[in-house]
Amino acid sequence: MGSVSDVKGPESNPANPTSIAAEPRKPICVLGLGLIGGSLLRDLGRLNWPAYGWNRSEKTITRARRDGFDVSNDLEATLQRAEADGALLVLGVPMFALASLLDAIKVHAPTCGFTDVTSVKEQVHDLVEEHGLSHRFVGGHPMAGTANSGWPATMTGLFKGAVWVVTYDNAVAGDGMGNGADEAEDLWLKTWARVVAMAEAVGASVVPARARKHDRAVARVSHLPHILAEALAIAGDQGGPLALTLAASSFRDGTRVAGTEPALVRAMCENNRAALVTALDETLELLREAREELANPDKDMKDLTEVGHAARGRFEARAGRKKGEGANRPIIRVQPGGRGWVEQLESAESMGAQIGIF
Amino acid sequence: MGSVSDVKGPESNPANPTSIAAEPRKPICVLGLGLIGGSLLRDLGRLNWPAYGWNRSEKTITRARRDGFDVSNDLEATLQRAEADGALLVLGVPMFALASLLDAIKVHAPTCGFTDVTSVKEQVHDLVEEHGLSHRFVGGHPMAGTANSGWPATMTGLFKGAVWVVTYDNAVAGDGMGNGADEAEDLWLKTWARVVAMAEAVGASVVPARARKHDRAVARVSHLPHILAEALAIAGDQGGPLALTLAASSFRDGTRVAGTEPALVRAMCENNRAALVTALDETLELLREAREELANPDKDMKDLTEVGHAARGRFEARAGRKKGEGANRPIIRVQPGGRGWVEQLESAESMGAQIGIF
């Protein structure tokens, strides 16, 4: 069974002091203090990891300061501070606010490495490339959340046991010694290692995936479930009060995520249109077949029910049969910039493996 | 909030000693001792309600006897005993075994009232009518179950808080005095009242519905969720190991019932084809619209997400926001055979109300 307990952050790996990963805990600057960014700042605080934050709203700043955090609503000053102390930037703002934040980073933090926590990755990568910042960007997606949002919803421990996807689209091969060949490559490798170390420090399991592969996967397992839940909720409701009275646990579980705020569902789905259309087309085909089998008394649903049952079994084998059970994923150890390390990441991606840095 | 605590079985209603419902606890004979039938026998035993059972398999009989129950695998003898002591028969066998059981009832228990516990109702009503037994049949569907089956899965308390649908397709108007106009009508009314009293005694909430209305409702809220779960499980699995690793709680909840044995899913869906095709067609239309909205960058998913969210809200308002929370349904009191009682049942059906007998 996979365990994160033997995956250590850089500071606990003194046996390999020359590796990229073995840097001391450098500061982390969290930009945007919503559920994800704010919870990250809380976890870093708990770990005594040097960290500070920025948020646009004065109200959030007041609340976060009251809780003892080092935060500001002056973006320029915060970015200048991050540049001065070589902080890793974590972009915790919604998709629509990313472009203007990248503009500010380009001007006020011209050498900082940075990551994000947005739920889709290809659009973010494109935006970063348009800004000419790819050489210091590593995409991230912590797969954690609650139904609530904003600073009051933040908590410690939100990422414990969660998967944290880290992209490697911008990976450099390195010189096989665990270092980049030049200063720019070195910056990217160090940024990547710092993102991984941060995710592991807050208890997440790091899974490497390129932006496009990530977006295709979450379309199937995260965005599609929301679409189906909305449709099921509507179809049940169209049955009127008797149907709602007869609805029991299969309807309850099947519609649970239709309770998510519509704006959040739209933000996920509308930012991942192409991948979601592909997943939805496959689903429509399966449902059309089921419809024909039901409409024809000579046909049966053997295929759908048996293939579906086997698929659910494979999910349970990987994720644990019950919520909260430990996941059963392969673990691959990589050395950032080491010989063949990008190929190792590709292997991990195709296996859905989590990684550890050595 | 609806509560079953003020809904009493007939034996506790001495204020109305002449009503149909006020009979003493007559014996109950459970035919088929699977999860539902066996659990019912356990509950009746706990209540000291005179009850005995039959099952085809010797193994089940041995196990049930070891647990202290009065059971037999001699169908003819069991039915003759039921006929002699005026028992209510509860048919707990699967759909495919109903026809031969009805044949035996016709011969060996020619005057007993009977009910069933099958998950669809129209086919059962048709079968009973073909056998010429409608005048003593009341359909039933306790909406309770677990993933397991057979005597080892039986338990006390399975029906506590569950909805138990009772049909009234064969209802007679009565003479307005709470009695049938003749002996046949009297038998049907007494059977109906006994089924309701039994369901209430084991802690269920009785909801009246005609067979066709029942089947249409469960197609939407019980069978459709299974079809969508199978399709989602397959679409997720087609994303390969990376998708299964990234799958979190929305996928887990959305695919849970794909873990049900395929044969059970088929039995539900293939016995309710017409109603399920209607529900599936509505769902396909919603999903096709969603697909077009996603494929066109100028369109959005405002409608689907807002209507879906509101529908889930209506379900939560009725069923309770969390599993196990008390349901919030209207309660209507009826007197079997009383003036206008069939119209009262129709009202209850259209409101998804539960009923109590007075």
Image (cartoon, coloured by chain):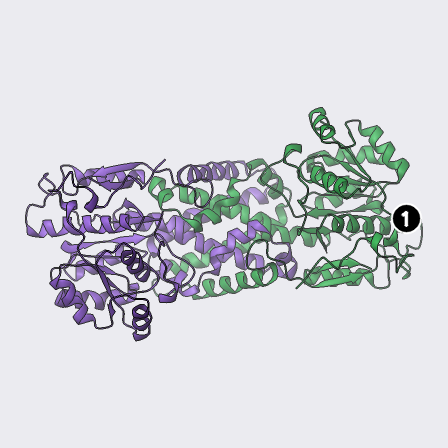
Chain colours: A purple, B green
Q: Nearer the viewer, residue B99 or B261?
A: B261
Q: Nearer the viewer, residue B177 or B41?
A: B41
Q: Quadrant of residue A178?
A: top left
**Left or right: A116 in relation to B173:** left
Residue depicted at x 19% and y 48%: A193
Q: Is residue B132 depicted above or below B291 in this figure? A: above
Residue B109: tell me if it is visible: no
Tell which residue pokes out farthest to the left in this image. Answer: A182
Q: Position of residue A10 (x, y in %)?
A: 19, 45
**Left or right: B351 in relation to B340:** left
Residue depicted at x 41% and y 51%: A280
Quadrant location of the N terminus of chain A? top left
Q: Disc 1 marks which residue? A: B184
Tell which residue pokes out farthest to the bottom in this image. Answer: A58
- Looking at the rendered structure, the kind of residue marked 1 is Ala
Q: Secondary structure at mark 1?
A: helix
Please tell me how many numbered marks the rendered image carries.
1
Q: Position of residue B105 (x, y in %)?
A: 83, 35
Q: Quadrant of residue A346?
A: top left
Question: Which chain does tag 1 point to?
Answer: B
Quadrant location of the C terminus of chain A? top left
Q: Local crowd at mark 1 within 10 Å, few (<14), some, or many (≥20)?
A: some
Residue A270: tell me if it is visible: yes
Q: Nearer the viewer, residue A205 or B341?
A: A205
Q: Position of residue B239 (x, y in %)?
A: 36, 43
Q: Position of residue B60 (x, y in %)?
A: 70, 28
